[in-house]
């Protein structure tokens, strides 16, 4: 019998949906905090295959999720292209910026990324040996627009202002950067698949700030290119796309990009998405991560509403965004129990 996650991704409607959680290996888990302490900092953990494998397995051991997601970060690709990257505790990522042609010229070719990223492939090889046979292994990368927003600003920004400014002021440079990231992402995801990833997910966390023609050019088109290239090499590997906060543009996204599944953020009404997005295939989502902090009867109700809304088609239960460090691990167990029929 195929793994539950793979069956949903193949378009099967199941009695209860498979479940996993964005950021399931993270600071809300005491065992994650202990391993991270041992590794030193977050990036050292990402590049340590034994420990990255260990934290990937922790939520599988604790909860028996239907999928494990590689422990890494979307910003490893800019680093592999030659950007400086570091994390400021309590604040988030910092990178050397790309805002001029001279900055861009310092980046390396896409084909050179594997030297930096080879420990990530080793993590996947370890996981293919150590995961329970029913657990699917998900690889991932950031989508080009989202990765570019960090490379251009040098940090996370509330409105992706610096990336929008570069797009307006020097579109040729902006598009060259997106093309370089696109090329690197194809090579990176393909290498992840060769190392054991059975599914890959493309995180476009800031897709919602692209509107109209920009959404088509910089969210849809790069995803379509990446998925087409991966499908040419690995036709059997399903792709989950997450154009977060795309709103009405979620409709048709799977058809336009070739994605096998579209992940929904928690601003999307589940009944609307069942009618307008799930008609094209599998959907993933979309419980508000805040329920993992607050729990209680509201959690049960929200989970049941989502399960009921998507019952008529292929569905993977997940949060609408990553679980936060202040979440209560007991609420995660409760969510799983309710999804699985408790
Ligand atoms: O989901 C998983 O468990 C897999 C691992 C994973 C991480 N980051 C680990 C991580 C994945 C899939 C990501 C994706 C990622 N990284 C995204 C896209 C998804 C999203 O959340 O929108 C983005 C935008 C990033 C960039 C990033 N990494 C930021 C902005 C931050 C700082 C904010 C924060 O939560 O601390 C990170 C750090 C990060 N990535 C942590 C983890 C577990 C926390 C680091 C720590 O242990 O201190």
Image (cartoon, grey):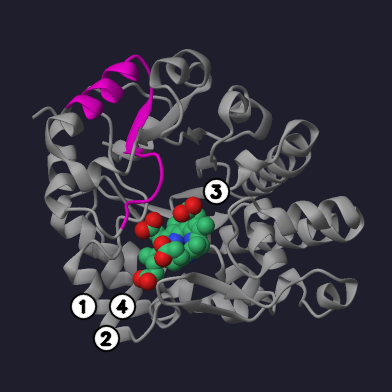
> Few, some or many C-alpha atoms within 10 Å of disc 3 (few <14, some 14-19, many ≥20)?
some
Circles 3 and 2 in contact, beta carbons < 8 Å: no
Q: Is residue 150 left or right of residue 21?
A: right
Between the residue at mark 2 and the residue at mark 4, the CA separation in whole angstroms equals: 9 Å
Q: On residue 205, which mark appears?
A: 3
Q: Which residue is mark 4?
A: 51
Mark 3 or mark 4: which comes first in sequence? 4
Between the residue at mark 2 and the residue at mark 1, the CA separation in whole angstroms equals: 6 Å
**Residue 282 in the image, given as x and y percentages of width and height:** 44, 28
**In this picture, which residue range is highlighted in magenta?**
301-324
Q: Is residue 178 magenta?
A: no
Could you tell me if residue 255 is visible in this image? yes
Q: Which residue is mark 2?
A: 38
Q: Secondary structure at mark 3?
A: loop
Tag in front: 4 or 1? 1
Q: Which residue is mark 1?
A: 34
**Residue 326 in the image, given as x and y percentages of width and height:** 25, 58
């Amino acid at each position: 019998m195929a793994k539950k996650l793979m069956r949903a991704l193949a378009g099967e409607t199941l009695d209860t949906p498979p479940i996993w959680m964005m950021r399931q290996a993270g600071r809300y888990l005491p065992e994650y905090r202990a391993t991270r302490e041992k590794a030193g900092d977050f990036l050292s953990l990402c590049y340590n295959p034994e420990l990255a494998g260990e934290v990937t397995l922790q939520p599988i051991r604790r909860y028996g999720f239907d999928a494990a997601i590689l422990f890494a970060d979307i910003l490893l690709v800019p680093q592999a292209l030659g950007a400086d990257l570091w994390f400021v505790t309590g604040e988030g990522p910092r990178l050397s910026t790309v805002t001029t042609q001279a900055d861009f010229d310092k980046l390396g070719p896409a084909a050179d990324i594997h030297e930096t990223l080879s420990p990530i492939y080793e993590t996947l090889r370890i996981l293919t040996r150590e995961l329970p046979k029913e657990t699917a292994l998900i690889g991932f990368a950031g989508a080009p627009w989202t990765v570019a927003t960090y490379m251009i600003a040098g940090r996370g920004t509330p409105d992706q202002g610096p990336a929008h400014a570069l797009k307006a002021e020097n579109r040729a440079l902006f598009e060259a950067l997106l093309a370089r990231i696109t090329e690197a992402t194809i090579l990176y995801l393909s290498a992840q698949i060769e190392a054991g990833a059975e599914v890959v997910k493309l995180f476009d966390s800031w897709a919602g700030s692209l509107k109209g023609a920009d959404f088509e050019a910089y969210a849809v088109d790069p995803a379509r290119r990446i998925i087409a290239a991966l499908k040419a090499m690995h036709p059997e590997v399903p792709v989950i796309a997450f154009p977060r906060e795309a709103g009405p543009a979620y409709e048709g996204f799977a058809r336009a990009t070739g994605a096998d599944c579209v992940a929904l953020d928690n601003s999307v009404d589940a009944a609307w998405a069942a009618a307008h997005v799930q008609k094209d295939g599998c959907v993933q989502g979309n419980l508000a991560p805040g329920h993992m902090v607050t729990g209680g009867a509201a959690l049960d109700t929200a989970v049941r509403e989502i399960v009921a809304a998507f019952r008529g088609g292929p569905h993977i239960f997940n949060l609408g965004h990553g679980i936060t460090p202040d979440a209560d691990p007991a609420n995660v167990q409760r969510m799983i129990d309710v999804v699985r029929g408790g």
